Image: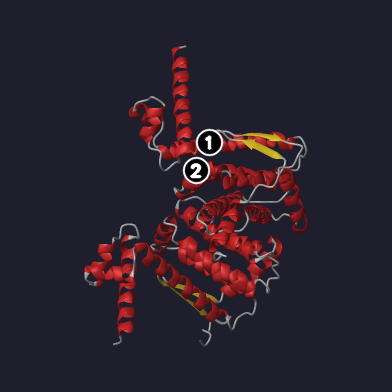
Amino acid sequence: MSQYKKSEAVKTLILDSAERLFEEKGYEATTVADIIARSGLQTNRLNYYFQNKAEIAALLCKKMFRCVEETVMYTLFPMTNSMIVKDIIHIRTLLRTMLSKEPSMNFYYEIARENIITEIIVSASYSHFIQQREFLNLHYDKDTLLIYAHFFAASIVELIKARKEGDLKMPEEEALDFFNITHLKLVNICKAEGQAYLAEAKQLMKNIEYELKDMTTVRLRAFRADRQELPQ
Amino acid sequence: MKRVAEYKKSEETKEKILDAASKLFFEKGYGETTIKDIANLSKLSLSRMNYHFDNKAELAGLICRMFLKSLSDEIRAIIKTFTSDVILRDTIHIAFWAKIFMNNSNCRNFYYELACDDILRHNLVESSVRHFIDQLNYLHIDYEKENARAQARVFVASLIELIIATKEGDLTMPVQQIIDTYNDFHLRLLDYDKTKMKGIIEEANLHVSHIRYEINDLMSIRLWYSNEPEPEEPDKNNDFNNDDFIYALPPA
């Protein structure tokens, strides 16, 4: 095996071990020593790959974001052309992954409190806003979009915190609706228009099955209206 | 009578502690100040202090709420003299609020520290829920209570994010642009008429430029309306960029 491949394999091993531990014990309770022990590494080698626990958590979080983005794109490609509908489903899938079920909910809550998530969402949503600027007819400069990306990230993090802390007792579906509408308002779509898009997205989602495999892996499967699985 | 006297005494002690804490937070910063410093300055034993307040965070939270109440009372008294439009009032309020948070260095540091410690969030939510309910009623928009709560939370979280990101250098555009974008977001949350948004924000900014302030501690603020608009303050964020730019130039 080449040196590069070997090092990638060790990295993956560390990430996987850390993910299992975060799942079992939570982020805060897991120590770097636990991760080293679980990966069967020599003590000094973890530092060679990662600076600290926060960096590992950030990578896992990014992995989940990537996974959601890919599965949403892939699944929706034959189903709709509407960028807005895709966005709605994208955001719902993300939030659902972070909000609906333990131990995932706890993990994302803990790393939200450590300010690990905000930065990741800021950079992801900023490039997203930039990409969509023309499509959505947003006449904003890049600076404004960067500020929006900060609003968007802060809002998601707040939602994760507030749900876990027991504030915002609305049913999950309503919380997701609220969030979708807020996002659409940012990209210049008012509430009434937004609700029409939301209805369209939800109609589509009736034929999509959501599965959370582990804290960072999400699968979507699309069915035809007659419940036949769509060919992948 | 004895009970009343005791109550009074206890209130006086509390005030003494708050004064001392506010002074120290203002001068040294929240993080640098210890509970012991506060006890020393208010000439109380640590155990007496603990009887009144559980910890530093509780003190900071109270000071923050007192400041915002003072700011809100003062600004409403001024605005009342020229408009009864609730949305214009709150747009001015937000613009002024954000300006103090981002431009006044003592406030900026204090609120940045509270923001990082997650203290600010809890202390702003309840008052901003009331604001949103006020505004939604004024605009005759039907709402559910939980939804107004969610809006208020998003609104507060976004402000806190701005305080942190500005201080940490992630947002380097002019402060005025940040404030305008924040106001614009607030109006969007309220589904305010898009065609009127720009106008109302400009009107609010014009008023803000007439409002002068004086801050001597972190518990209160004094405001007055001047007939002259304020001369343009050098923008903190811009200043910083220009300096960088000058230093980056090769020597002639």
Q: Where A27 sits versus A201, above or below?
A: above
The mark found on residue B218 in the picture is 1
Q: Quadrant of residue B14?
A: top left
Is residue A215 at all visible to an observer of this figure?
no
The CA distance from mark 2 to mark 1 is: 8 Å
The three-letter amino acid code for the residue at tag 1 is Leu
Q: Given the current orientation, which residue lies at the most extreme front position?
A: B252
First reached walking from the N terminus: tag 2 or tag 1: 2
Label 2 with label 1: CB-CB less than 8 Å: yes
State which chain disc 2 sits on: B
Secondary element type, mark 2: helix
Q: Position of residue A172 (x, y in %)?
A: 52, 60
Of B133 and B30, the residue lying toward us: B30
Q: Position of residue A142 (x, y in %)?
A: 63, 66
Q: Quadrant of residue B93?
A: top right
Of B188 and B173, the residue lying toward us: B173
Q: Position of residue A70 (x, y in %)?
A: 50, 78
Secondary element type, mark 1: loop
Q: Given the current orientation, which residue lies at the most extreme top position?
A: B1
Image quarter hosting the N terminus of chain A: bottom left
